Amino acid sequence: MPEGKIIKALAGFYYVLSGDETIQCRGRGVFRKNKVTPLVGDEVVFQAESNTEGYILEVKDRKNELIRPPIANVDQAILVFSAVEPGFSTSLLDRFLVLVEFNHIKPIICITKIDLTNEEEYEEIQQYASDYRKAGYDVLLTSSETEEGVKDLMPYLEGEISVFAGQSGVGKSSLLNVLRPDLELKTNDISSHLGRGKHTTRHVELIEVGKGLVADTPGFSSLEFTDIELEDLNYCFPEIQEKSEECKFRGCLHMAEPKCAVKDASENGEIPSYRYEHYKNFLQEIKDRKPRY
């Protein structure tokens, strides 16, 4: 049986890339019975009589999957955040980073619209970029308008399946339009009333950019820590995980425990105070989560 990768899901059809051909497929009823929904990025086994009449027979094991956006087997996430319009939010970025880290996906931080910043705003963004680089993250400062820094993304995309993710209106589609002008993806200005952009991407699709595959996604409407447990959170903050090895007690949650190296590092500036505050807030959020039955 032939095999391939789902590169687009739309209106009940799955478009499977196999070799140089794309075959339009439907899912067999067995998926509904087994509660398996094929996702973009899935490696599948299919049968087809023509390029428009195929059926997916099997979805192979996934190395990871995201619910919003619905995509599987992602290598890395380009987390797109604007410097302004909408304003840069470290809390929202850290929430994205936790979810990406938890799913064993490499995050790359891409801060857009730097051409719109004034001197003070630009210096603040530079400081945040420095903080996240010290934590071990790759950070790119870009402008789709001037194209500054955008081409620096290309080496990261080569040979990888990447998802572009971030809140609406930050310029994900604009970035992709610079990387591949022929795409002509729709973009929207920020609503002055709502202070955020409308979703301009309606479905998930893997598209070729350079020598990699990139997913432009409809964005995230929810960012809840539904599957993350208290002991997992430590591993989703690289600098906290590294420093926790110096804590006196094994299993330290870095809240009220004595001789906590993480608390000390936050107090003396080794770990940015806002990162530690977000860690504590997220930990409390997980503690307050209603149990699932």
Image (cartoon, rainbow, N blue to C red):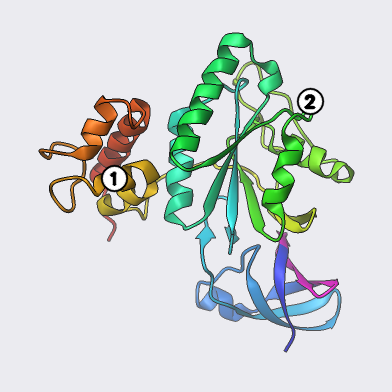
Q: Is residue 237 visible?
A: no
Residue 48: x %, y % from top left: 80, 83
Q: Residues within 10 Å of mark 1 (few under 14, many from 20)?
A: some
Which residue is pictured at 31% across the width and 30% down the height? 277
* Residue 162 drawn above or below residue 174: below
In the image, is residue 16 part of the stretch drawn in magenta?
yes
The answer, for residue 140, to whether it is visible in the render is yes
Q: Is 60 inside the magenta-drawn segment? A: no
Three-letter amino acid code at the position of disc 1: Ile
Q: Is residue 158 left or right of residue 289?
A: right
Q: Which mark is residue 286?
A: 1
The circle on residue 86 is none
Query: Mark 1 or mark 2, which has the lower sequence index?
Result: 2
Q: Residue at x 81, y 37 (%)?
A: 178
Nearest the eye: 258 or 70: 258
State the image quarter where residue 201 is shown.
top right
Which segment did they paint magenta? Answer: 8-23
Q: Which residue is mark 2?
A: 145
